[in-house]
Amino acid sequence: MSSDSQLHNKASGWSARFAEPMSELVKRYTASVDFDKRLALFDIQGSLAHAEMLAAQGIISTQDRADIERGMAQIRAEIEAGQFQWQLDLEDVHLNIEARLTALVGMAGKRLHTGRSRNDQVATDIRLWLCNEIDAILALLRALRLVLLDLAEPNAATILPGFTHLQVAQPVTFGHHLLAYFEMFGRDAQRLVDCRKRVNQLPLGAASLAGTSYPIDRERVARTLGFDGVCRNSLDAVSDRDFAIEFCAAAALVMTHVSRFSEELVLWMSPRVGFIDIADRFCTGSSIMPQKKNPDVPELARGKTGRVNGDLMSLLTLMKGQPLAYNKDNQEDKEPLFDAADTVSDTLRIFAEMVAGITVKPEAMRAAALQGYATATDLADYLVKKGMAFRDAHEAVAHAVRYCVGKGCDLADLSLAELREATGLGAQAELIGADITQVLTLEGSAAARSHIGGTAPETVKKAIKAARSELG
Ligand code: ARG
């Protein structure tokens, strides 16, 4: 069946090919206009480029092209004004716009679909839309990364406990901690830039699946629409949605990073930890407990990660069993794709605002870092630098920590004599000199890690500077 040629008759039952009209239930089941009308302006953009090429190639007249442009300008105005009458009977965004065009300009409207199918048309629309979304998300990622730098800068030397296994491990600077997220979101941006290259290829010209017998100029259409190139195989062009899957995978990773950050924000804001406060406008109260201030935004963001993972699973599953070329299954690509893009955009926008409004509580961070023997590794490293093997040093410090646990104090609280004694090293404990005091401080520990990628305040300041010039 040449599916698209008879579609204007769909309301009356697919014309001569069908003996009875489509049932109402099937009509609702197969229609996509309720959600794909979102692609309308890209659909018009694609049609205008197609018409321009058809006229340039002498496939339609320049008068037809002018009529199409006039009609499309009006349709665009109607859509933007919210006055366009979307009809479920016309199934999708493409047929709605084409039918309206024909109503407005007559024969030229009927000629627009020459050498084209909804199969290459929809793939073109989605790709145009997605490039636009990717650009917007990249701008949002950049904004969030700038906000992270703005918070990292005054906190380059603010010390908090670094955790492994959620147990106090070693002191780190808060600026350094924030820069970890700066890196994650930076890789997310790189992934999207890379994905965009594969999205930005033109399917139009593939027609239904086999190409078209008209003398079309696909490269011209690609240039007009700003595509980097044309899809090289017509069957592939109309059928694969790997570009959408790839986007959703990148989106899922953005949300994974947002989710990890959210988990930390929730933890840091818990009164038991109290490292930060999140501005009231991002929190909600409880309907029953008057004292509550809940970090709903990070919790929701953590939860919405599940949606985007779900969107990715939907598209992977949608694609996996499809034979070449186009199948109606692909109509199901839109809602998950839209949802992933919307969720990531909204989340990034709100995160940039929320992170900018974080209040840091350095005293609470410092107090927490002072508990849990965060500088024990520094004592071991000190002994190694004095000539001891690391494993022996590790053991000696373990003895000293155990002693402190029994006494209920920190390593730094011991006098030099007591510390030497506590290591159980006997005469070898003489290796520990008075200079150990500085080594066991939080500041000494952080400052000692001044290599590239380390947590030292000076290193963090340099990293922030480099990051700012990277963002330009
Ligand atoms: N609404 C359809 C979609 O989203 C457009 C393509 C329909 N093509 C067809 N042969 N039925 O995929």
Image (spheres, rainbow, N blue to C red):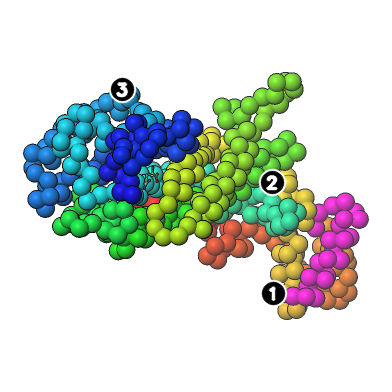
Q: Quadrant of ligand 1?
A: top left
Q: Kindly report the secondary structure that dominates the magenta region of the rendered protein.
A: helix
Amino acid bearing label 2: Arg
Q: Percent from the top left, x then y, of residue 344? A: 49, 43
Do we see residue 232 in this rendering?
yes
Residue placed farthest to the right in the image?
406
Amino acid bearing label 3: Gln
Which callout, 3 or 1, points at the residue further toward the start of the chain? 3
Report the residue marked by disc 3.
Answer: 83
Name the side, left or right, on which 130 lies relative to 221.
right
Q: Percent from the top left, x then y, of residue 196? A: 37, 55
Observer-side mark, 3 or 1, equals 3
Is residue 42 in the magenta section? no
Q: Percent from the top left, x then y, of residue 141? A: 45, 46
Report the residue marked by disc 1.
Answer: 385
Q: Is mark 2 within 8 Å of ligand 1?
A: no
Q: Which residues are magenta?
A: 390-413
Vertical side of 295 occupied by 317: above or below? below
Q: Identify the residue shown where x is 78% and y is 72%.
A: 393
Residue placed farthest to the front in the image?
19
The secondary element bearing badge 1 is classed as helix
